[in-house]
Image (tube, rainbow, N blue to C red):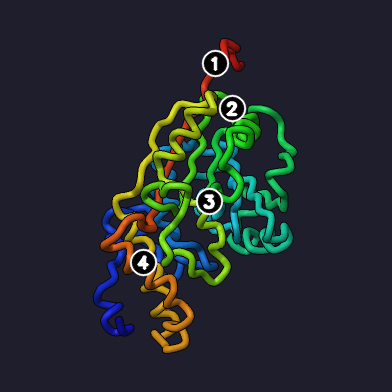
Amino acid sequence: MTSGHLKTYLRRIDRSHYPEVQAYSWDEIYSDHLAPGGLYLAARMTRSMNLKESDIVLDLGCGKAVSSIFLAKHFGVNVFSVDLWISANDLNKKVSERGLRHRIVPLRLDVTRGLPFAEDYFDAIFCMQAFHSFGGSVAFLRHLLTHLKPGGRLCVGGTCFNEETPGNDLPEIYHKTNGWDAEYSKYHSSEWWRALFIKSGWVDVIECYELEDGQIMWEDEVLFTGEKAKWSDAYYQRGKWLINQILHGRHNRPYLTHFIATVEKKRKIQDKIIM
């Protein structure tokens, strides 16, 4: 398929479904190389988090803090922005430039090695496009939930496949990558994540499902990056492997999509009341 045909074939996100970001430009939606979904995904995630002004929120795997800025700006919450790959100095400079230094605390941490926070400290935990990297076990989930207050909500959103494959043996087309998505093997369906949250015994599942426009989020991001690159031959050749995967998914399973899971920490765990 040529770039010309591609532009007419791929779908754009329907902005009317995302009033939270109506005032944002397309550039801002995907600013600082946000993954497919961009702030559309962040907006959808926050709808079920019951955030209140001055809540203390952990933004886990915050990347370049675009999601942290969104949370602080729109909800007036206080955010601890945690990432392994981005320096705290870079994050601090960015949030200071946005006038949100009083709302956002940047930290560079490896969350798998422990978190330096008190038990029951956070009112909510937000994790966009990162949880699949480190959160695929009951042990880690319980470790993380230790820092969430009883009745607090954890919201996870990210890329996934719509269904599991036997032995996680993905079709050959998904074996072609450029390295950044080497974690395809960690992508799971929404039902897989639901089962993990239930297995932990520590949460009630509020919602966990594939987004109705989860596939379109991949297509919208390709359209955005294509426009930015002026649909050059170099861009098309560089991203052809991913474009082919997306096109394959329009008519085949499994396909790349997005899911959201929101869970609430139980007030009573294993007959022990949490105060």
- Which of the 4 image quarters holds residue 64? bottom right
Which sits earlier in the primary sequence, circle 1 or circle 4?
4
* Front position among marks 2 and 3: 3
Circle 1 SS class: strand
Which sits earlier in the primary sequence, circle 4 or circle 2?
2
Q: Amino acid at mark 4?
A: Ile
Residue at 30% from the left image edge and 78% from the top image edge: 6
* Front position among marks 4 and 2: 4
Disc 1: which residue: 268
Quarter of the image with the C terminus in it: top right
Which sits earlier in the primary sequence, circle 2 or circle 3?
2
Disc 2: which residue: 149
Circle 4 SS class: helix
Q: Amino acid at mark 3?
A: Lys
The one nearer the camera, 96 or 255, is 255
Q: Residues within 10 Å of mark 3 (few under 14, many from 20)?
A: some
Disc 3: which residue: 186
Place of residue 111 in the rendered image (x, y in percent of width and height, measured from the top left):
68, 45
Q: Residues within 10 Å of mark 2 (few under 14, many from 20)?
A: many
> Is 248 on the left or on the right of 152, as rendered?
left
For the image shown, how many numbered marks are present on the structure? 4
| Label of residue 246 in the image | 4
Which sits earlier in the primary sequence, circle 1 or circle 2?
2
> For the residues marked 4 and 2, what is the alpha-carbon distance in whole angstroms?
39 Å
